[in-house]
Amino acid sequence: MSEILFVAGDPSGDVHGAKLIAALKAEIPGLRAAAVGGPLMRQATDDFIEDLASRGIAGFWEPLASLGFLRALLARIRDYLRDRKPAAVVVVDYYGFNRRVLALAKAAGVPAYYYVSPQVWASRPGRARVIARLVRRVFAIFPFEEEVYHRAGGACTFVGHPLLDSIPPPVPDKSVGCPLKVALLPGSRAAELHRHLPVFLDALDELRRNFPELDARVFAAPSLPDEAYAAARARGVQIVRELDYKVRAQMDVALCSSGTATLENAILGLPMVVVYRLSWITYWIARAVIRVPYIAMANLLAGRALVPELIQRRANKVEIARAAKEILESPAKYQELRAALLAIRKDLGEPGGAARAARAIAEDLRTLGRLGNGAPARAGAGA
């Protein structure tokens, strides 16, 4: 029986990792999956090792507070590779930790693959060379990433963005409704929620001066409990949990933390104001290393400032509300922005990216003779 280890470290990686696990199980009959990830990967696997994604460990210096936990987890993964001898390791995004996982796989002689490349093109492009040395192939979700890895001497295939499999077609001829529907997307990590949700709620109060019947919804991350959104509920904001994007597709505008949600909104054609707050030490480090002009993926892919970005001090209730109002006050500009966002969707390939990556991984492992040679399953795995 063959076994593959999957490793993801944040909520978006948990989503993509769970879908890839399902796709690989369809490609390889009898495959067992072991995982470090989050709640969605827990549901998809046979042997769940640790919930790393829900811990929200991110940033430049913040992981230092979790150094003991991360070292212990790497030791567990090293022992797993030695004892279980899996057919392969597949890592998802989350460069800092997964680079070390890949080094462990290399030392153990286990072939490795990267699904959803970390954004090495945004800062420290030398990381692409590190990844190229440690994996057999990168499966990229943005078309320009192929060239990044080819220049680094690595093998890379653009498979299409996995969001295209789950986000429905955009609502046709969408215009601003009455009442105005506002989506709040404060981030998928606890620290992001702590920094963004209060200012988003205050910005709603500012917006109500122009839109008194405003209807707001906060879209909860799978890894965070309802209690984390208690402040929103106390202000009359409904908590939405969904995987099919049907409610969000009906929203008129979003107040959104920078991250995967900005791309989701672009695919939906949902105009947004992008906000991000960091600890000041992390912010100054980020300023020193980030080499791209925008933080929102929608703006990066468009090559221009389609949607406003408000960072640090500018991420305050007055500026957020003003930026949202400017989007909403002109029907013609609103439609132009929707059209520009939806154009991004066409550049992201076709649905089926996870299936294409799974097919390529399975074919490569068959070529290597790795399938069917794993250790027998442990009793009680998956508990």
Image (cartoon, rainbow, N blue to C red):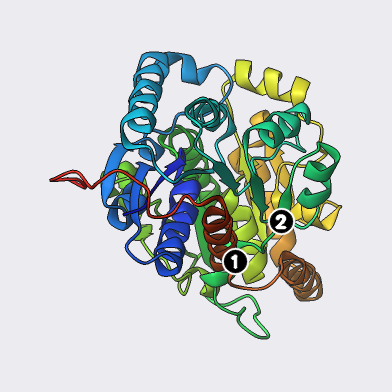
The answer to whether residue 209 of the structure is visible from this angle is: no
For residue 72, what is the image quadrant? top left
Where is residue 42 shown, x and y percent of the image? 30, 50
- Is 9 displayed left or right of 253 in the figure? left
Is residue 137 depicted above or below 353 in this figure?
above
- Is 249 displayed left or right of 266 in the figure? left
Residue labelled with disc 1: 356
Is residue 117 depicted above or below 363 in this figure?
above
Residue under the point 57% across and 61% down: 363
Where is residue 164 shown, x and y percent of the image? 60, 69
- Label 1 secondary element: helix
Checking the image for residue 272, the label placed there is: none
What is the residue that sits farthest to the bottom in this orientation?
172
Q: Are marks 2 and 1 in contact (CB under 8 Å)?
A: yes
For residue 102, what is the image quadrant? top right
Q: How many circles with numbers are drawn on the protein?
A: 2
Q: Residues within 10 Å of mark 1 (few under 14, many from 20)?
A: some
- Is 338 displayed left or right of 373 in the figure? right
Q: Amino acid at mark 2?
A: Thr
Residue under the point 60% across and 61% down: 360
Checking the image for residue 157, the label placed there is: 2
Residue under the point 67% across and 34% down: 131
